[in-house]
Image: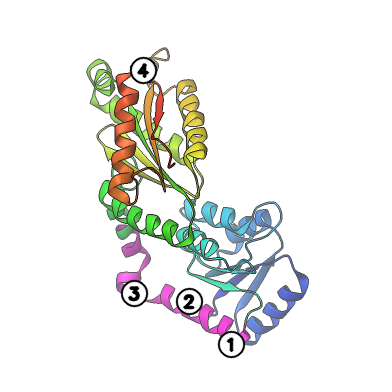
Amino acid sequence: MAETILVAEDDPSILELIQVILETKGYNIFWSKDGEETLRMAKETKPDLILMDVMMPRLNGYEVAHLLKENLELKDISIIFLTAKDEPDNKVVGLRLGGNDYITKPFDIYELIARIEAALRIRSIPGPLHRDDRRLAELSLADPLTGVYNQNYFLERFVEEIERARKYCYPIACVIIDLDRFQNINEKFGRIQGDQVLQRMAILLKKSNRVVDMIGRYGPDQFVIQLTQTDLGGAKVVAERFQNQVSRSRLVQLDANYQVTISIGISAFPGLRIGNREELLKSAWEALQEAKKRGGNTLECTPVAI
């Protein structure tokens, strides 16, 4: 049975060329011209692969990929980004969002076919690359309670992100969040309600951060966020916005009047005496402790480089 490919491309000339190429190879082809139509067509046709432009009307390719990976029925669709955006950071974003490959325009016809065939071949391989096994691998990276990255995997990835920031000369920020007096929640409402507060906090974090940012659980009642291409000032804006969201949220559902607050420590690379992961985390942790000394429900930033 021929595989189905959805081509998401708003340039008619490129779309026609790709369609001719793929139809000669015997694939079933569907096409869409914007991000919202791509999502709708993906739900209707359940393609094996989406060849997706990044710059599309309504929703861009990165946003479509993020929504696909959050849908249980569509998350296993292979994605190849096809775009004129060839900067390394764009490729990193595409691959981090679950893309299988990244091809830049103008493209070579034979290379395009080869990469499509490779992506479809990997999809069909049983064993370690089977979707059930991939799901098990995903679970091994996640904190079982909150669904964000567990501490070990977050710290491992954090090293890679800092080295990438060093190589391409852009800032990267670290934000550590601590729930104030969390033990009081467990004592007053019980451990189950405390766990649910952590789960709701994780959901808030996922909704409020960009898909390119990385969120991990850092301790029993702490979360850590890595903000890509964000300096200390930008991180402070993000943290203040999230602090306001928490203050407006009903995180303890057994008591609508119970107010959950958070303390936040922020650091950034490059910064004063900050050159690696350990220094970046230590600096954010020290800032967090200063925020807690002030009574909580506040945030502290580390000094910037002079």
Taking the view exactly as shown, the residue that stands out farthest to the top is 257
Whether residue 208 is visible here, answered yes or no, is no
Q: Earlier in the sequence, mark 1 or mark 2?
A: 1
Q: Marks 3 and 2, how far apart in space?
A: 12 Å
Residue that numbered label 1 is attached to: 110
Q: Where residue 303 sits in the image (x, y, percent)?
A: 40, 35
Q: Amino acid at mark 2?
A: Leu
Dominant SS in magenta:
helix
- Magenta includes 124? yes
Q: Earlier in the sequence, mark 2 or mark 4?
A: 2
Q: Marks 4 and 1, how far apart in space?
A: 61 Å
Q: Earlier in the sequence, mark 4 or mark 1?
A: 1
Whether residue 138 is visible here, answered yes or no, is yes
Question: Range of the magenta residues?
Answer: 108-136
Q: Earlier in the sequence, mark 4 or mark 3?
A: 3
Q: Residues within 10 Å of mark 2 (few under 14, many from 20)?
A: many
**Which of the 4 image quadrants contains residue 17?**
bottom right
Mark 2 and mark 4 residues within 8 Å of each other at the beta carbon: no
Q: Is residue 40 left or right of residue 215?
A: right
User: Residue, x 48% and y 57% (percent of image)?
Assistant: 169
Residue that numbered label 4 is attached to: 254
Residue that numbered label 2 is attached to: 120
Q: Where residue 271 sits in the image (x, y, percent)?
A: 40, 44
Q: Earlier in the sequence, mark 1 or mark 3?
A: 1
Q: Amino acid at mark 3?
A: Pro
Q: Amino acid at mark 1?
A: Tyr
Q: Amino acid at mark 4?
A: Leu
Q: In this rendering, is residue 38 above or below 282?
A: below
Q: Marks 2 and 4, how far apart in space?
A: 49 Å
- Magenta includes 207? no
User: Residue, x 48% and y 34% (percent of image)?
Assistant: 236
